[in-house]
Image: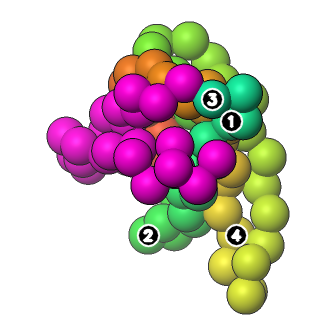
Amino acid sequence: FLRAREEARFSGIRWAEGLLTFHVSSAIKNDQSLGCMIPYRFNGKEISNITVNGAQAFFIVRKIKGFEYSFLMLKAGSNYEIGVHYSN
């Protein structure tokens, strides 16, 4: 798990009109999932949905040290395009 987590790469991070997009690439196959933490609230908006490679994705919201984060689980050993949609 630790090796897969350290090897995962985030790239192409962009923000435009309430949409955060980025790529996640992971080459090491592992039975464990990679957890991705995304701020649940930003600039008065909160996440309405998350897409992974264009498909709606399941996420959970947890509070850590007073801040809410959305947790998205990804299978190690693949490449993903993530879209995080924020709305009021």
Dot placed on the residue nearer the N-terminal end, 4 or 1: 1
Q: Which residue is mark 3?
A: 30
Question: Residues under labels 1 and 2: Cα distance?
Answer: 29 Å
Q: Work out whether residue 85 or residue 59 is closer to the camera in this orientation and state it.
A: 59
Amino acid at pointer 1: Ser
Q: Which residues are magenta?
A: 1-29
Using the image, tell me which numbered label, if any, was put on residue 15.
Answer: none
Quadrant of residue 19 within the rendered picture: top left
Residue occupying image coordinates x 61% and y 41%:
34
Amino acid at pointer 3: Asn
Task: Examine the structure image and report whether residue 88 is included in the region drawn in magenta.
Answer: no
Say what secondary structure mark 3 lies in. Answer: loop
Q: Residues within 10 Å of mark 1 (few under 14, many from 20)?
A: some
Residue occupying image coordinates x 62% and y 18%:
56
Dot in front, 1 or 3: 3
Q: Which residue is mark 4?
A: 68
Question: Residues under labels 2 and 3: Cα distance?
Answer: 36 Å
Quadrant of residue 46 within the rendered picture: bottom right
Question: Residues under labels 4 and 1: Cα distance?
Answer: 21 Å
Dot in front, 4 or 1: 1
Say what secondary structure mark 1 lies in. Answer: strand
Dot placed on the residue nearer the N-terminal end, 1 or 2: 1
Dot placed on the residue nearer the N-terminal end, 2 or 4: 2
Asked whether the viewer can see residue 21, the reply is: no
Q: Which residue is mark 1?
A: 33
Q: Residues within 10 Å of mark 2 (few under 14, many from 20)?
A: few
Q: Which residue is mark 2?
A: 43
Amino acid at pointer 4: Glu
Dot placed on the residue nearer the N-terminal end, 4 or 3: 3
Quadrant of residue 32 within the rendered picture: top right
